[in-house]
Image (spheres, helix red, strand yellow):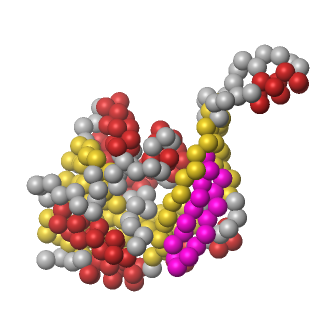
Amino acid sequence: MDRPLYSQLVGYYELLEGRDWKREVDLVATVLKDHGCRSVIDLGCGTGYHVRSLTRLGFRTTGVDISAQSIRFAKKKAAQERARPRFVVGSYYDYHPVQSFDAALCLNWSIPVVGREVRRFLDNTFSLLRPEGLLVLDYERVSDIAWNNVGRPILDSWDLDSELVVRVSVGQVDSNVLSSRDIYLVYPKRHDLGSPMEDSRYKAVNGRKDVQVYLDHSFVRFFSLAEIRKFARASGFKVVANLVLPRGQYKRNYAVLERME
């Protein structure tokens, strides 16, 4: 796992994702409670926000992610929050513990991009769940592609106490797959420039060696609900609900799949 977002930038991940984390946890928790789910596995858990939050709500949780850095961060945060979930470094294509689970999550657009990998992921998830177990995944609809932004640089920034984080993103869409190249710059805030002279300030700022620059490349597939249903049926699932949360001018979609016998 060599993406900077999951390694050097892992401490910023929950900020940079820009999700409405609490509303998302509330939505997922409601679905799980309505279906009597108590044990949950998060496949591609990242820094473990959902796992930690659901643990505090009384669910028995396990988080699996291929990034060792993300899992280390998740364990550290869980200890700080006095939560006791289980975190494991592993691939959601082949992770298979002895116990089965009432529900699985795959959020943060972690569902695979290539069709055969979607099938591989769903087949393994099927084997992780008890009969009538749930899989909750989020996805982007094809109709949600913001064509006006494709190919244009999008600038975001986060002004933190001791750092300024800047992201410049450029995306391209090919066959309903968004390929995004993101440049992250982390500037430390300096309070020791001292001199009021413009020349001295200029030299001080331009002599800094501690600006961090990272290039991150990601892929997100856009699905139709019909495609989700087709993939689900092929792996022994049925779609029992499709939920939506507002996301600015867009929407975030959540498909709820149930394991069939």
Residue at 29% from the left image edge and 67% from the top image edge: 121
Residue at 61% from the left image edge and 42% from the top image edge: 213
Residue at 42% from the left image edge and 70% from the top image edge: 113
Q: Position of residue 149 (x, y in %)?
A: 67, 67
Q: Is residue 10 visible?
A: yes
Range of the magenta residues?
168-184
Looking at the picture, does residue 2 appear above or below residue 160? below
User: Is residue 85 left or right of 229 when viewed as pictured?
Assistant: left
Looking at the picture, does residue 107 appear above or below residue 51? below
Residue at 38% from the left image edge and 43% from the top image edge: 70
Looking at the picture, does residue 103 appear above or below residue 211? below
User: Is residue 183 left or right of 217 when viewed as pictured?
Assistant: right
> Could you tell me which quadrant the C terminus lies in?
bottom left
Q: Position of residue 105 (x, y in %)?
A: 31, 59
Q: Is residue 18 visible?
A: no
Question: Does the magenta segment cover residue 244?
Answer: no
